[in-house]
Image (cartoon, grey):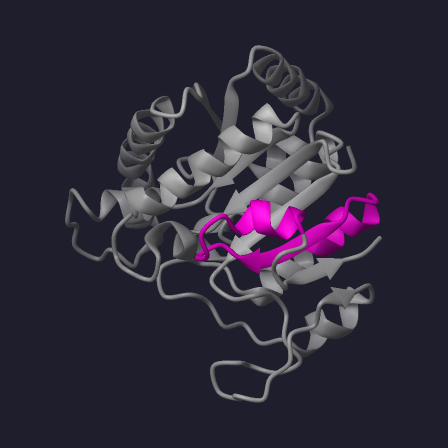
Amino acid sequence: MKYKRIVLKIGTSTLTQGSSRISRGKIEDIANQIQQLTEAGHQIILVSSGAIAAARQVVKMRNSGSIKVKQALASIGQVQLMKIYQEVFSDYDIPVSQCLLTYYDFKNQDSKENIINTIEALLQFNFLPIINENDTVATDEIMFGDNDKLAALTAVLCKADLLVLATDTDGLYNSDPKSNPDARLIEEVSDLQVHIDQVGEGKSDQGSGGMKSKLVAAQIAQEASVPTWILNGSQPDFLIKALGQESKFTKVTV
């Protein structure tokens, strides 16, 4: 199997499907795909954003744009988000687990060993690891990135065969497709720095990430010889279609 272990990162824009609420239908789509892929022998590690979006469905706070309020919303929403995952994934016989990490955990050798040991044990007992940033003690993903870098660090640490970054576009274009109808999808790329220097800081409406943060994450993975796919997570069966070469997206080669 070419891509046995896959780290799949789902951004807020994918989970909300362009709305202001977490889409249970999209989570069902993700669960259905993971069930099929697991039965086919793949190991999936899920990195999920969406905690703040989940919180905003149940609570309103003043100054919701400030970092400290976003941290509070993330704390509230993480419970809600995991509840949704647990409820939906249980219908597909997929037991889930929660792993809250920060960038600092990847800089400490003891922490890195603990992360690996925990994830390996979860996979051994057929639990799906669902990773998010611990926003109570770190704010990097709240401010920018939407878990892209965290997903890349996880893929490298866990020796993944593939990193998949699901977003709200088909991948990397040679210009902004929202303003240029003639923009062309770049289906394969190796020299990431050129594109990192050229791409803008545009972010999705709900998420904190943009194409630049995905390219930076892909570069981290590339340096460790882990290929990255950037694809449109809003499409049904997006990962299964990509693995079956039934859709177009951006492949970052190593």
Total label count? Answer: 0
Q: State left or right for residue 46 relative to residue 58.
A: right
Magenta residues, as a range? 217-244
Q: Does residue 63 appear to the left or right of 226 in the view shown?
A: left
Using the image, determine if residue 251 lies above or below residue 243.
Answer: below
Q: Position of residue 157 (x, y in %)?
A: 72, 32
Query: Which residue corresponds to the image point at 67% horizontal and 58% vertical from the top-left?
Result: 216
Q: Is residue 41 left or right of residue 100?
A: right
Residue 100, given in percent of the width and then of the height, sits at: 48, 29
Is 64 placed above or below 155 here?
below
Given residues 98 and 244, the one toward you in this image is 244
- Where is 28 relative to 172, above or below? above
Task: Say if residue 199 shows up in the picture.
Answer: yes
Q: Residue at x 67, y 40 (%)?
A: 153
Q: Dividing the picture into quarters, in which one does residue 122 lie?
A: top right
Residue 112 screen position, x and y as percent: 68, 25
Residue at screen point 69% across, 31% down? 5
**Image quadrant occupied by the N terminus:** top right
Question: In this rendering, would 40 be left or right of 58?
Answer: right
In percent of width and height, residue 239 lies at 57, 47
Q: At x 30% / y 33%, what residue is drawn? A: 84
Foreground residue, 145 or 159? 159
**Residue 40 is one of the magenta-drawn residues:** no
- Assess whether residue 231 is covered by the magenta stretch: yes
User: Looking at the image, is 183 positioned above or below residue 121?
Assistant: below
Snapshot quadrant of residue 102: top right
The reply to whether residue 133 is visible in this rendering is no
Pick the front one: 53 or 238: 238
